[in-house]
Amino acid sequence: MKKFLLIIIPLLMLSCASSHQQESDLDEPQSHELLTIASRDFEINTEYAATIKGLQDISVIPRIEGYLQGIYVKEGDRVKAGQLLFRIDDAVWRAAVAEASANVQQMSAALEKAQLEFEGKQKLHEQNVISDYELAAAKSDLAVAKANQSIDGFTPAQRFFISYGTIWRNNSRDKYLERRIKSNEHSPSEARVNRALGSMPHFYEAFDIPEGSKMYIAPEERAAIW
């Protein structure tokens, strides 16, 4: 029993000495490096995949065929009414107009000839030189020439433009037109006829349209795309 106590006591004394030394170390002041935090500006770049579009994208699509001879606007340019946007080779259309004009002149000449022949044969018939059949044939030829010159009171050139306007006839509600203008790049039918034909000099010649008419457009305000 005595040996056991002798061993325990030195161990307790050693433990107490170590504990007192640790407490003295903690009581001593310790030095630490002081850090100052300053505010700084940093630029953070973030990339996103996106597509930039306008509030309304409009495509100008001509309703005629031909080769482009000139493009006078660039994408994104501001344009105004009457400004020249494109120039399309109009050789085909000038040829068509020339052919129509030639047909009008030919029909006019045929009408004059038929009129002269009828008047001449009418005088011969009064003198009993020709038969009733020959006079009736001359009268029929005159009627055919008049029909070719004018049908329902319209000349061939007038009928050409009337036919063009006829194919674009329609009847649309205002709400449909408003939605179509906002979502479709093509012009409404009314603009295709009134505005397009109002910019063609041959249209004014065919109907002899005077200044002040509803269809009249001042030359400086007419479209010159083709």
Image: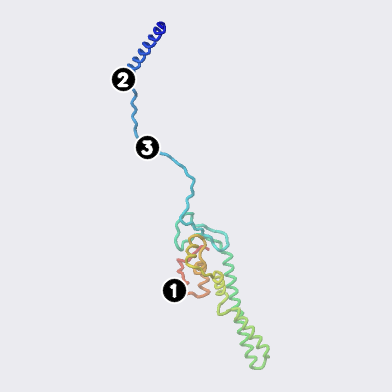
> In this figure, which residue is indicated by the disc labeled 2?
29
Q: Mark 1–mark 3 contact, CB under 8 Å? A: no
Circle 3 — which element?
A: loop
How would you rate the neighbour count of disc 3 (Cα within 10 Å): few for under 14, some for 14-19, many for 20 or more? few
In the image, taking residue 225 as reference, residue 110 lies left or right, namely right
> In this figure, which residue is indicated by the disc labeled 3?
41
Front residue of 189/217: it is 189
- Give the Cα separation between the discs numbered 1 and 2: 105 Å
Task: Give x and y (percent) for residue 35.
Answer: 34, 28
Image mark for residue 212: 1
User: In the rendered structure, which disc, 1 or 3, sits on the residue that comes first in sequence?
Assistant: 3
Task: Give x and y (percent) for residue 15.
Answer: 38, 13
Residue for point 45% across, 66% down: 221
Task: Give x and y (percent) for residue 5.
Answer: 39, 8
Protein image colouring: rainbow
Question: Picture quarter containing residue 212?
Answer: bottom left
User: In the rendered structure, which disc, 1 or 2, sits on the residue that comes first in sequence?
Assistant: 2
User: In the rendered structure, which disc, 2 or 3, sits on the residue that comes first in sequence?
Assistant: 2
Question: Which amino acid, mark 1?
Answer: Gly
Circle 2 — which element?
A: loop
Q: Is residue 41 above or below residue 218?
A: above
Question: Which amino acid, mark 2?
Answer: Pro
Front residue of 79/165: it is 165
Residue for point 47% across, 50% down: 52
Question: Which amino acid, mark 3?
Answer: Asp
> Does residue 200 show up?
no
